[in-house]
Amino acid sequence: MKKFVMAALAGTVAGVLATTQIAGPLLAQESAKTSSVYEQLDLFGDIFERIRAQYVEEVDEVELIEAAIDGMLTSLDPHSSYLSPDDADAMRVQTRGEFGGLGIEVTQEEGFVKVVSPMDGTPADEAGIEAGDFITHVDGESILGLTLDKAVDLMRGPVGSEIIVTIVREGEPEPFDVSIIRDTIKLTAVRSRIEGKTIVLRITTFNDQTTPNLVAGFKEQVEAAGGMDNINGIVLDLRNNPGGLLTQAISVSDAFLEKGEIVSTRGRNPEDGDRFNATAGDLAEGKPVVVLINGGSASASEIVAGALQDHRRAIVVGTKSFGKGSVQTVMPLRSEGAMRLTTARYYTPSGRSIQALGVSPDIVVEQPRRSPNEDKEEEDTTSPFRSEAELRGSLNNDSLTEDEIRQIEEEREKAEAAADLRENDHQLAYAVDLLTGLSALSISK
């Protein structure tokens, strides 16, 4: 019995000893790590004091600390940053749909400022800036090596003032300058129109007005067409849409889905993830949907395209999207500024992350690019041939009634409008033709 007790005691002592031997180094490592962090913070304080006391010129202490904070955040990824009180106010105004500037969404890639997309109807759009362009100089000053916020600051200025940006564009042998006049940017979140029997919903951004504009524009076009029976489908045009509010991306997707997951987010800790599901009701009443995307479609645009694609609710047409699959949370700070921090990645219903990969279209359709030096003189489109009807003294067609002749003329006008659309917007024309073909197949059945 004594031997058993001694053996048990020995085992206990050995267990305690083993635990101490394992835990001891771990605690020492953690203590050393904490000590190292405090040493680095002390180092930061020393450097701050030396700059304040010995830099060749007097420095603004607040700006110095803000620059240090911004440097810490921007070192994480291109989308995390510090927002000064003025920048935080400007961001809140932008989500409401009106702000001043050039009208471009930009990011940073290998030290260069890259255009994610120009916004519809803005000075940058009208000046010919394209998604994928690289901005290398602002008013002749190189912006290589500047932080994204500093580069953006250089592009800001009074409304009505001119800025000259130097652009490097794929396919162009040399950089070229573009003059842009700054203006107040008023974004219309959704523009709606009818092409043939197709409703085209052009979504330019995801702000507070996007879903209400979408629903109102859709209903307006349905009424103008004389009801849903006269509609063959819907085109959601998300090209050059840089994204915006996650909540609006979810509600736009929900407008066309009856059920199922729309998007999920996964953060650093598994318990921080969220899933967002569709509710019953399809705005389009089951009519086919085509989603148009390109390299300027980012973030919230990719959530919509990915959700409708995974549920086979829409055919995605165009070119690969931008590939921004991360979620930024804006956190207010005591200084009245804010911190924009990447807190999660988002995933489409099938579980795929599109971070850096983008959404791949079901049908790849390239949009022909126009050269900045392209001759813009209008070509003479007059046909060299004359028709029978134009010949003097030609016979009338007495086999058709006036209504039949009018119908033929209307069909010809529609065909000519479709031809013009193919010339001006090849991708949209493809989407409209696709829905026309699907409608014809449905009728034939």
Image (tube, helix red, strand yellow):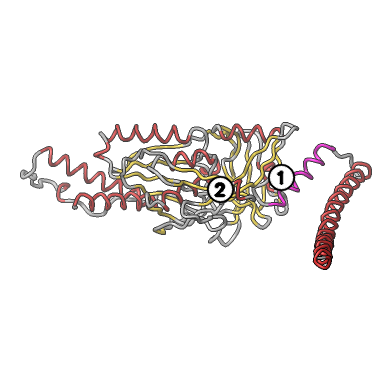
Question: Which residue is most to the right?
Answer: 54
- Tell me the amino acid under the disc marked 1: Lys
SS at mark 1 in the image: helix
- At label 2, counting other C-alpha atoms closer than 10 Å, the crowd grade (few under 14, some 14-19, many 20 or more) is many
302 with respect to 343 (left or right) = left
The residue depicted at 67 percent of the width and 58 percent of the height is 110
Which corner quadrant holds the N terminus?
bottom right
Instruction: Answer with left or right where residue 209 lies relative to residue 282.
Output: right
Q: Range of the magenta residues? A: 61-76
**Sequence-earlier tag: 2 or 1:** 1
Q: Nearer the viewer, residue 105 or 263?
A: 263
Give the residue drawn at x 24%, y 39%. Answer: 229
Comparing marks 2 and 1, which lies closer to the viewer?
2
Residue 54, percent from left and from top = 94, 45
Give me the disc on residue 398. none
Instruction: Determine the secondary structure under disc 2.
Output: strand
Residue furthest front in the image: 1
The Cα atoms of the two marked residues, 2 and 1, are separated by 30 Å
Q: Label 1 neighbourhood size at 10 Å, few (<14), some (14-19), many (20+)?
A: few
Kindly identify the residue that appears in the image at 45 percent across and 35 percent down.
211
Q: 93 above or below 258?
A: above
**Left or right: 126 in relation to 441:** right
Q: Which residue is mark 1?
A: 150
The residue carrying mark 2 is 265
Q: Residue at x 49, y 42 (%)?
A: 249
Badge 2 amino acid: Thr
Q: Is residue 127 visible?
A: no
**Most foreground residue, 12 or 140:** 12
* Residue 339 seen: yes
Q: Position of residue 45 (x, y in %)?
A: 88, 45
